[in-house]
Image (cartoon, grey):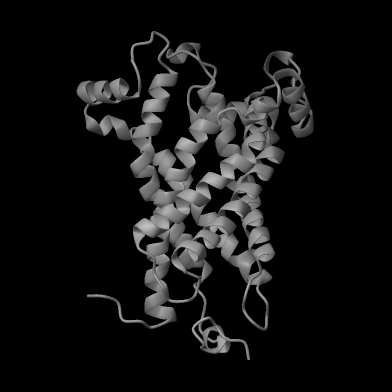
Amino acid sequence: MAEKPDGTPSNQTQRKPAIPAYVKAISGSLGGIVEASCLQPIDVIKTRLQLDRASYYKGILHCGSTTVTNEGVRALWKGLTPFATHLTLKYALRMFSNAVLQSVFKDSNTGKISDGGRFLSGFGAGVIEALVIVTPFEVVKIRLQQQKGLSQELLKYKGPIHCGRLIIREEGIRGLWAGASPTVMRNGTNQAVMFTAKNTFDGLLWRKHEGDGKVLQPWQSMISGFLAGTAGPVCTGPFDVVKTRLMAQSKSGGEGKYYKGMFDAIKKIYGEEGVFALWKGLVPRLMRIPPGQAIMWGVADQVMGFYEKKYVHDIPLPV
C-alpha cells in the first residue's frame, strides 16, 4: 500500500471528501472582490492618464494626489462596480470549472491528479472563462478605451451598454466575440500555467498539497500567487497582443479589417514590427496581474483552508 511522506497510508486521505467546486467558486469570487477593491485606484489613475490629452497630470503620483484633492479619496474607486463584477464572475467561473475538470482527470483508484491533468484542467477553465465572460467584456472595454476625447457627443460609443448594442447592430452578435481565438489561447494557456505553477510553488516553498489539511498564511499564499501570476503573462504575451488588435477592429464605414484572424495577425505583426512587438504591453501586464493574483490567492486559500479544516479534516479551528 502506498504511503504518504509522513508514513500514513494514502487511502486514509482518499476516504475524506475533497473541497467542493462551489466552495472554490465562492473563494474565487471573494478573492475577486478584494482584488478589485485594492487595485481599483490603479485602474482609475491609468484611465485618467490615458485620457489626459493636455498633459495636465505630471505622472502617476500627481494624478492620484490631484484626484484626491479635487474630488475626494472616494474618486479613486470610481467604476468599482463593473470592475468588481467582472473579476468576481470570472474568478468564480474559473475556480468552479477548474475544480470540476480536475475531478474528471483524477485517478479513480488513488484520487490523485497528474501534472498533465492539472495543466489540462487549468487550460479548460481558461477556455470556458474566455468564451463565456472575458471575450465580450474585453471587446467592449477595448472599443471604449481606444476612443480619444472627453466629449460624449463626439464619441461613437457613449458607454458600455451603448457600445455593446452598437456592436451587435453593426457587426452582429458575433462582433462581441471578435478575437475569441487568441483570447481562448491566452486565457487557456495562462490558467494552465497559473494553476500548475501555484500548486508547484505551494509544494516547493511551503510543502503544502491540496487536501492535506494545512492552511497557508496569507503572506505565503500571496507569494505563491504572485510567482504563479508572473509566469502566465510571459507565456501568453503574443496572444494578448493579437487579441487586442483583433478586438479593436470594427466594420464601420464599409472598411475591411486589416487582420483576417489570429494567424494572419501574428504573421503581419512579426513581419512589420519585429518579434518583440508580440510582447508589447508586457510590463504593464506584469504590474497588474501578479499583484492581483497575490491578492486573490491570499483570500481564496483562507476560504478553502477554513472549509478544509472545518468540514474535511475536522481540525479544531483556532479561537
Decide: is 191 above or below 277: below
Decide: is 210 above or below 67: below
Residue visible at 40% across and 20% down? 49
Q: Picture quarter containing residue 200?
A: bottom right
Answer with left or right where residue 314 lies relative to residue 98.
left
Quarter of the rendering occupied by the N terminus = bottom right
Residue visible at 42% across and 62% down? 301
Q: Picture quarter containing residue 291?
A: top left
State the residue in front, 236 or 178: 236
Answer with left or right where residue 102 lies relative to residue 219.
right
Q: In the orientation shown, which residue stands out farthest toward the bottom?
A: 1
Residue visible at 48% across and 26% down? 159
| Residue 168 shows in this picture | no
Residue visible at 47% across and 44% down? 290
Q: Residue 227, image x and y in percent?
A: 49, 50
State the residue in front, 159 or 12: 12
How many numbered marks are there? 0
Q: Residue 26, image x and y in percent?
A: 44, 61
Q: Residue 273, image x and y in percent?
A: 70, 19
Decide: is 111 above or below 31: below
Decide: is 127 above or below 243: below
Q: Residue 11, image x and y in percent?
A: 57, 88
